[in-house]
Image (cartoon, rainbow, N blue to C red):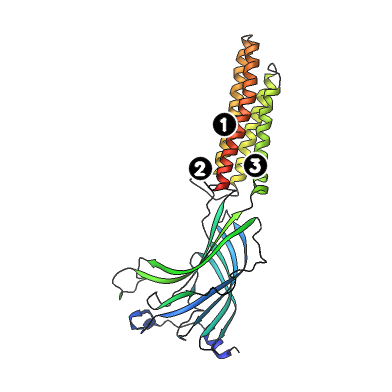
Amino acid sequence: MLCSSLWAAALAPAAVDTSALAIDQRPHCDTVRTGVYITSIHDIDFKQNEYTIDMWLWMRYRNPALDLYNNLEVPQAKSVTKSFATLDSSGDDLYLLMKLQCVMQDSWRIGNFPFDAQTLRFSVENSQYDAKAMVFAVDTVGKSFDPRFTLRGWNIDTMKILSGTRKYETNFGDTRIVKPHMEYSSFKVRIDVSRDAFGLFMKLFLGMYMAFLVAYMCFYIHIDNTDSRFSLSVGGLFAVVGNKYIVDASLPESVTFTLVDLLHGITLLFIILTIIGNAVNLRYSKLNQHSKAFRFNQFMRRGVLIAYVLLNAIFIFKAMKGW
């Protein structure tokens, strides 16, 4: 069914045709019906702001002058690998099918990490003609991704396929275009994913909570053992700081105050409160006011734990709901 001669012509490097850039010479606007079938999404890397997507991409069109294979552009892609391309001209339309593997660059929203939801974006444009000469139309027949593939640790919530127009405020050096403004048709795929975060949350924050509990145990040591009480609090303080550096190492730089920063900040604050409480108890002990020291220790024992658990529950709940 496939025509080998057309296949060779389609894959041959296209010569630069300046007349193709003069879009006003084209008698009509060509429509390219485009579809996609995603087979895999993997290697999601928060530190490098990237992920890898594998898919089958097909295009149906009538104008043989369209060199869609050589003029295919994937914006925001770090690398694009094309393989298994076939061209079928046996019907009324030309039918181009190819396998793509793209390493996509994207920005992650880490404010609620690890209870975050992300949008993975993929788009295709044609650099040969602008939106006045060629437009993409969406082919949505059948499924758009392989239901057998799963994102480990993630849930696929929604997937949207649409076409649109992307604007460029430049003429790309073409002096025939007076106004520096160009519009190109775009085929877009947007995948909304949310993280299955309970296991990751415990893995990241278990050390922090253990450090807080170690510092909190000072309230169960006799008031006279001041060295032990201070040692536990200071040790927990350094443990939380170390845990914070470990978690930050897996995340991209951010100028916003994230959930990771918030929970570690709260933990540091409450450990400092335990140190202050120990200092107050030491002061009472030096003044031989042991009854006041005991009551204050009981107050701190209850108040610190209740306030710490309550604040953690509130902020974690808000992050889970995306507020």
Residue 205, numbered label: 3
Residue 173 is left or right of residue 300, and the answer is left
Instruction: Tell me if residue 97 comes above or below residue 112 in the rendering.
Output: below
Quarter of the figure with residue 269: top right
Q: CA distance from mark 1 to mark 3?
A: 16 Å
Under mark 2, the amino acid is: Phe
Query: Which residue is identified by label 2?
Result: 257
Whichever of callouts 1 and 3 sits on the residue coming sooner in the sequence is 3
Instruction: Tell me if residue 129 comes above or below residue 317 in the rendering.
Output: below
Instruction: Tell me if residue 24 comes above or below residue 3 in the rendering.
Output: above
Under mark 3, the amino acid is: Phe
Q: Is residue 22 visible?
A: no
- Marks 2 and 1: CB-CB under 8 Å? no
Residue 269, numbered label: 1
Residue at 62% across, 36% down: 240
Q: Position of residue 139 (x, y in %)?
A: 52, 75
Whichever of callouts 3 and 2 sits on the residue coming sooner in the sequence is 3
Crowd class of label 1 (few under 14; some 14 to 19; many from 20; radius 10 Å) = some
- Marks 1 and 3: CB-CB under 8 Å? no
Crowd class of label 2 (few under 14; some 14 to 19; many from 20; radius 10 Å) = few
Quadrant of the frame with the N terminus? bottom right
Q: CA distance from mark 2 to mark 1?
A: 16 Å
Residue 43, numbered label: none
